[in-house]
């Protein structure tokens, strides 16, 4: 009897109208997450002025959001692996929307900080959108479509900068918080149309449900599934302790039953998943991914904050004061808007390199280039030169982060994919917690050279870690 796998079915139906709809829905989820992150660049200074808080408390407001994202990344990853991708998407979206709107009503700084922490918990589920989308994409298109998917993140950063530019000049930061929560809310009416991932259904041994989803994809794309019945082929686990080539990783192996998945469900889910992630086959990849996610988050979110803080800090230090009150003038929004646009060329460059050089080489090339752009900023530069250097650094950081978000789901098997990527994202959020202390705290204390050196060291170590990844996933099926 003829059989086919999810990968062969997706390859047969191709990337069509169905995947385009999934792309738009998942992309809106990333728009919502990027807007919530970019919001931190604008709300901190405004809250500082209204409630007269210290620069340390201002940076703490950003840090607590990333603390929430750390918890959310782990929690929503486990939920989506245990109860389904759609369940993780629904409840993370509901939580983010509710907390976002309520935070706009905060009566004081402590209440705002607590509510933004809860927003962070909801936003931490953003990685589920990317994993869910990738599980519908044929292997031969995965690299290019992940880059296109990442354009939604850039769209969110540009939208937030534009929104802040308009709203704050007319209304207040409370309205900005409310409007920023709106894209997440707009996802809810369309949730009923979203399909469950066929890869997840196969991993749960729900073959009939997976077949129905694949038939729906084929019908929407006006294509035909391969002849036969759907089976679940588990790819051979890659032994990362041994030296293997990509060709070896692509060799097919004999089909076997999903015994590992049944074992996983019979154990305590989170403990079993963590045990799998740190098994001999995945340990090296997992530990390196944790560090690279940390470094990329530290660099990317640090650059977002640098875009709004560096010029202001230079003016304060040049005046001989440790800190002066900053004005939320048009130049702040202009600089942030320009550096946000830098993500577009960054994505275009990574789209070319990721299919040419592969995942690993693209990441370390972009990270080293980012170091090169940041280097001159150890010394005070003109405002134009500073904006230009941050533009280049932001482009490279975004490109590297995008390829990393593509690489991580490709490394892990379906049974622990969301949990693995979620924990890696959670480790990355620690970088988000720490970076405001460097990007804001050290700059406000007139230690620009030390702050930039910290960024340089972290980026260089991340580039080396990318070189040490044991496998190249370009062209591999998602097992």
Image: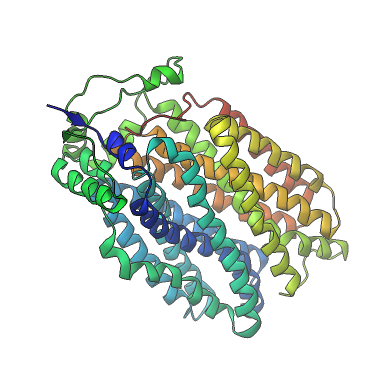
Q: Residue at x 38, y 45 (%)?
A: 15
Of the pair 214 and 38, the residue shown nearer to us: 214
Q: Position of residue 290 (x, y in %)?
A: 48, 37
Residue 465 visible in the snapshot: no
Residue 188 visible in the snapshot: yes
Instruction: Looking at this view, name the residue that lies furthest to the top.
Output: 243
Instruction: Looking at this view, name the residue that lies furthest to the bottom.
Output: 170
Q: Quadrant of the C terminus?
A: top left
Q: Residue at x 31, y 70 (%)?
A: 189
Please tell me whether residue 357 is drawn above or below residue 212 in the rendered image: above
**Quarter-wise, where is residue 125 in the image?**
bottom left
Of the pair 281 and 235, the residue shown nearer to us: 235
Q: Quadrant of the N terminus?
A: top left
Is 360 displayed left or right of 268 in the figure? Answer: right
Q: Position of residue 84 (x, y in %)?
A: 25, 50
**Quarter-wise, where is residue 441 in the image?**
bottom right
Q: Position of residue 176 (x, y in %)?
A: 55, 76
Q: Position of residue 349 (x, y in %)?
A: 63, 42
Is 66 displayed left or right of 391 in the figure? Answer: left
In this picture the colour scheme is rainbow
Q: How many marks?
A: 0
Of the pair 413 and 119, the residue shown nearer to us: 413
Q: Residue at x 45, y 71 (%)?
A: 181
Please tell me whether residue 56 is drawn above or below residue 385 in the rendered image: below
């Amino acid at each position: 009897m003829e059989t086919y796998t999810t990968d062969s079915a997706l390859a047969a139906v191709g990337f069509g109208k169905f995947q385009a709809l999934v792309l738009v829905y998942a992309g809106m989820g990333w728009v919502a997450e990027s807007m919530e992150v970019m919001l931190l660049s604008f709300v901190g200074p405004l809250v500082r002025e209204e409630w007269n808080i210290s620069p340390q408390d201002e940076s703490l407001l950003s840090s607590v959001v990333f603390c929430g994202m750390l918890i959310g990344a782990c929690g929503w990853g486990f939920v989506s692996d245990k109860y389904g991708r759609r369940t993780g998407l629904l409840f993370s979206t509901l939580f983010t929307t509710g907390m976002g709107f309520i935070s706009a009503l905060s009566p004081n700084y402590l209440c705002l900080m607590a509510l933004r922490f809860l927003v962070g918990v909801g936003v931490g589920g953003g990685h589920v959108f990317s994993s869910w989308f990738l599980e519908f994409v044929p292997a031969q298109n995965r690299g290019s479509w992940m880059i296109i998917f990442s354009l939604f993140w850039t769209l969110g950063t540009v939208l937030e900068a534009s929104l802040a530019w308009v709203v704050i000049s007319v209304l207040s930061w409370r309205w900005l918080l409310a409007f920023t929560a709106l894209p997440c809310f707009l996802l809810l009416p369309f949730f009923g149309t979203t399909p469950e991932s066929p890869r997840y259904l196969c991993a749960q041994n729900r073959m009939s449900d997976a077949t129905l989803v694949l038939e729906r994809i084929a019908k929407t794309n006006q294509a035909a599934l391969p002849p036969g019945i759907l089976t679940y082929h588990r790819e051979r686990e890659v032994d990362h302790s041994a030296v293997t080539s990509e060709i070896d990783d692509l060799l097919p192996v004999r089909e076997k039953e999903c015994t590992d998945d049944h074992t996983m469900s019979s154990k305590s889910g989170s403990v079993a998943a963590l045990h799998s992630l740190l098994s001999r086959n995945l340990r090296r990849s997992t530990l390196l991914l944790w560090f690279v996610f940390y470094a990329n988050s530290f660099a990317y979110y640090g650059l977002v904050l640098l875009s709004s803080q560096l010029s202001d800090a230079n003016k304060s230090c040049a005046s001989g004061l440790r800190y002066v009150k900053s004005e939320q003038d048009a130049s702040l929004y202009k600089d942030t808007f320009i550096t946000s646009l830098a993500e577009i060329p960054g994505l275009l460059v990574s789209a070319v390199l990721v299919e040419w050089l592969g995942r690993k080489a693209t990441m370390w090339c972009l990270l080293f280039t980012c170091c090169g752009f940041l280097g001159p900023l150890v010394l005070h530069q003109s405002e134009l030169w500073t904006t230009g250097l941050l533009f280049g650094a932001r482009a490279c950081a975004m490109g590297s982060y995008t390829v990393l978000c593509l690489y991580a789901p490709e490394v892990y098997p379906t049974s622990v994919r969301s949990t693995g990527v979620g924990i890696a994202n959670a480790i990355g959020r620690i970088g988000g917690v720490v970076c405001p202390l460097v990007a804001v705290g050290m700059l406000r204390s007139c230690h620009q050279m030390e702050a930039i050196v910290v960024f340089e060291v972290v980026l260089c170590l991340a580039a080396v870690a990318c070189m040490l990844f044991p496998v190249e996933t370009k062209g591999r099926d998602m097992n």
